[in-house]
Amino acid sequence: MSIDLHLEQNPTITDLDAITAHNWQQWFQAWLTHLQQDANYEIALRLTDDDEIQKLNAQYRHQDRPTDVLAFAALEADIPALPPDTAGSEVEPIYLGDIVISATTAALQAQERGHSHRYELAWLAAHGVLHLLGWDHPDEPSLERMLEQQDVLLSLIDIREFTPNTVKSQVSQK
């Protein structure tokens, strides 16, 4: 399994707690491996500011306000399974979609929640990748499952700072 990660950063964003492109690549690789996604994948990750994410949120979700993370899944259905004879071979990567994170909102949320900006960015990226894989949280039980899965994903990259329940109320308000 491999991942092609296309990382873009809005020029106004400068403080990312030294998260390198290599860090992001390793994190997404660990998460997709854990989630038993055996194909080759492609994901675009854009780190931006509140102005840009507010425009996207208004355009695609009809909510004219900044948000922390948006995920635009390229596939509407479940992730396609590879035929047995192509698993592990060199095939075109499956494009999962785009994740857009407001580094501005992430910094504010990190401060409010008492953890690092780095942790908040990773937490939001994990949330975004779950959405690309078809996870959603339309109700309390599904939100709980998704937050628990995010905690598992973050434990894989050894960046744990709190449990899902500490942010449950803040996520459900969004």
Image (tube, grey):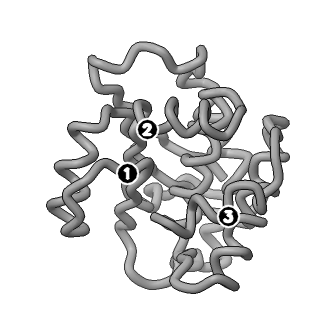
Q: Earlier in the sequence, mark 3 or mark 1?
A: 1
Tell me the kind of residue under disc 2.
Answer: Thr
The reply to whether dot 3 and dot 1 touch (C-beta < 8 Å) is: no
Secondary structure at numbered mark 3: helix
Disc 1 marks which residue?
A: 67
Q: Residue at x 42, y 42 (%)?
A: 101
The answer to which image quadrant residue 63 occupies is bottom left
> Relative to residue 12, is residue 149 drawn left or right?
right
Q: Earlier in the sequence, mark 2 or mark 1?
A: 1
> Relative to residue 8, is residue 112 drawn left or right?
right
The reply to whether dot 2 and dot 1 touch (C-beta < 8 Å) is: yes
Disc 2 marks which residue?
A: 105
Q: CA distance from mark 3 to mark 2?
A: 17 Å
Secondary structure at numbered mark 2: helix
- In the image, 166 versus 147, the foreground residue is 166
Q: Position of residue 75 (x, y in %)?
A: 39, 74
Instruction: Count residues near mark 2 (Cα–Cα under 10 Å), then give few for <14, some for 14-19, many for 20+.
Output: many
